[in-house]
Amino acid sequence: MYKLWASILKDTKILLRDKVGLALIFGMPVLLVIIVTSIQNSAFQMVNKNKLTTVLCNKDTGAVSKQFITALDKVGLLNLIPVPASNNEKDIKQLVREKGAMIAILIPPDFSQNVHDKAKNVSSKALESFGLPADSNNKHVTSVPVTLYYDPVLQDAYRFSIEGAIQGALQLTGSSETLKQLYTSLNDKPLPDSTERELLGSQSPINEVPLSRNQRDVPNATQHNVPSWTIFAMFFIILSLGGSVVREKRSGSFIRLKTLPTPFWIGLLSKQLTYLVVTFLQAVIICCIGIWLFPHIGLPGLKLPTDTLALLVVTIACGWCAVSYAICIGVFAETQEQANGFGAMSVVILAAIGGLMVPSFAMPASFHTISKISPLHWCLQAYYELFLKDGTLANVLPNVLSLILIAIIFQALTLWGLRRKNLI
């Protein structure tokens, strides 16, 4: 035990001397989790709370276009900025740039008349289907499109949301006009406003319930990002640990250990225990930032899982897997540059295919199987089970066992590489 403790002290001193490595191990993950969570939280708010600045050019003078604008405003997604109807397409593009807008909506001159004619056509067909007298002179009416100009910078997800909002407002306007036509045809008098509101406002509400086990709050950007970047931080210890293994190989430390009356496994175990503590500290620091710092900088606070033992087990399993991978890369790398370069790139690639950067469900079908070879995938699934679904140790056990199996494979490869290089 004394030999193991002495070896741990040695590895700790080596780690503390590596100022750059410490900055990468602790400083970079903290910055990443704060910056990425802030950006993603702002993106969520832009879709869910904040309104997107929108230039609106209404070239129609009818009442239907005003009704459409009212419906569009009630959606709550757009901050409409009206501009004079005299503007042409070139003027509208210029106004979009001047007002800092991302999109512009152009309502054509004959919009109201077109919607009115379409509603009249539809109501006549409905009356005919009921066996009631209707206007037989109706002709097919071609819809006049509302033009949407958008900045190419706007991502597809936001553009589709905007298109959905516009389509919803158009359908509401068309339905309202059709109801008015039907009511007038049947009753020979205009549709009362109260009746119109009652008929058009009868949609069933949507009750959103997250599929968590204990009915927790709806997950936010913090609950998603803190686990992701904690895992990323754990695996990025390869920049310090992998380089340390390479330095000891090149300095002859492994050869000198053969001459000492100390089992070689003590040296490997001390490195693993030292850096396992480091990964645990990384998780603690990032979680503390999520709990106490985020609420003070306008971000949602982190809510820890209810099963603390499961969180501890998952963190240790993730950390051990990360340490095993870093040592394995350090053993096979010939230089510190190789260890750092390949290690950093491989972690980024494994993070990408593991679902840390792009959700697994959004990947092509071929990547669903490939993602399972990434240890970061199993880490992420285990953390998500706890942070998002409020799972227990039994729920994350399959992921933990997968991580242990992957760590054992890395350990076996490490021993094979050491024997192959005659280092043990």
Image (cartoon, rainbow, N blue to C red):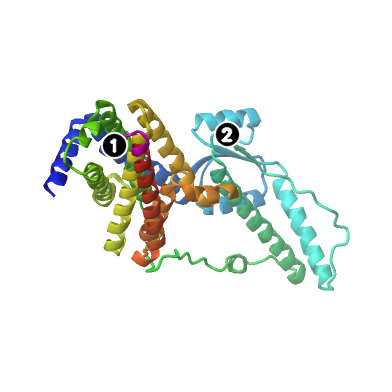
Is 211 above or below relative to 139? below
Q: Nearer the viewer, residue 201 or 277?
A: 277
> Is 420 within the magenta?
yes
Tell me the amino acid under the disc marked 2: Pro
> Is 396 within the magenta?
no
Q: Which residue is mark 2?
A: 152
Location of residue 138 by image quarter: bottom right
Tell me what residue is drawn at x 30 percent, y 53 percent: 315
Q: Position of residue 366 (x, y in %)?
A: 59, 48
Would residue 34 be found to the left or right of residue 52 on screen?
A: left
Closer to the N terminus: mark 2 or mark 1?
Answer: 2
Is 29 above or below relative to 77? above
Q: Which residue is mark 1?
A: 241
Looking at the image, the residue that sits furthest to the bottom is 131
Tell me what residue is drawn at x 38 percent, y 62 percent: 397
Q: How many marks?
A: 2
Would residue 73 be found to the left or right of residue 219 on screen?
A: right
Principal SS element in the magenta part?
loop
Location of residue 314 by image quarter: bottom left
Distance from Cα at disc 2 to Cα at disc 1? 43 Å
Tell me what residue is drawn at x 27 percent, y 46 percent: 279
* Secondary element at image label 1: helix
Q: Nearer the viewer, residue 410 or 421?
A: 421
Tell me the amino acid under the disc marked 1: Leu
Q: Position of residue 148 (x, y in %)?
A: 63, 40
* Secondary element at image label 2: loop
Q: Which residues are magenta?
A: 419-424
Tell me what residue is drawn at x 88 percent, y 62 percent: 136
Q: Quadrant of the C terminus?
A: top left
